[in-house]
Amino acid sequence: MSGFKSDQYGTCTFTVKQACPIELTMHIFGGKWKGIILSLLSQSPMYYNAMRREIPGISQRILTLQLRDLENDGIIEREETNDNPKKVLYYLTALGEDFVPILKSIETWGNAYLCKKNENKRS
């Protein structure tokens, strides 16, 4: 697992094999950019440069690191072309596809939360 330490998030002191499932899931999918990356890839495979254009504010270094983490965790795969210059296509693995319904649920919850927050501001 990409850099996971069992005590990195919260007070969980188990080994990685026995890590809290919620903590482990948050480690794999958490962070500022992974949700956006996964949302894009859930729609269709994307080339690196196209993905970078779709995510304003992300640096090349951070996108590369986030993609590498997701690849190391088995959530996405990459395919290099023989073109000149070389292009890299990213797509979800079966494990990544399994997360898409959860991602959609998170999106639904986020939209409901924003609606509630906006209602409370108007009150």
Image: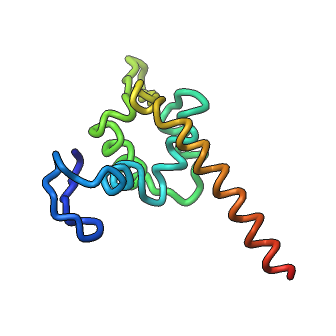
Judged from this view, the residue extending furthest toward the right is 122
Question: Which residue is at 40% across, 20% downward?
Answer: 81
Q: Observer-nearest residue: 117 or 39? A: 117
Q: Observer-nearest residue: 116 or 57? A: 116
Q: Give the position of the C terminus as an image quadrant.
A: bottom right
Q: Give residue 103's quadrant in the image.
A: top right
**Residue 79 at x, y percent in the picture:** 38, 23
Q: Is residue 37 left or right of residue 12?
A: right
Residue 94 higher or lower than 59, as above or below: above
Q: Give the position of the N terminus as an image quadrant.
A: top left
**Residue 108 at x, y percent in the picture:** 67, 50
Question: Which residue is at 77% across, 64% downward?
Answer: 115
Question: Which residue is at 57% across, 41% downward?
Answer: 39
Q: Is residue 112 left or right of residue 37?
A: right
Q: Observer-nearest residue: 118 or 41? A: 118
Q: How is the image coloured?
A: rainbow
Q: Is residue 15 left or right of residue 20?
A: left
Question: Which residue is at 29% across, 69% downward?
Answer: 10
Disc count in the image?
0
**Residue 75 at x, y percent in the picture:** 37, 35
Judged from this view, the residue extending furthest toward the left is 15
Q: Observer-nearest residue: 19 or 27? A: 19
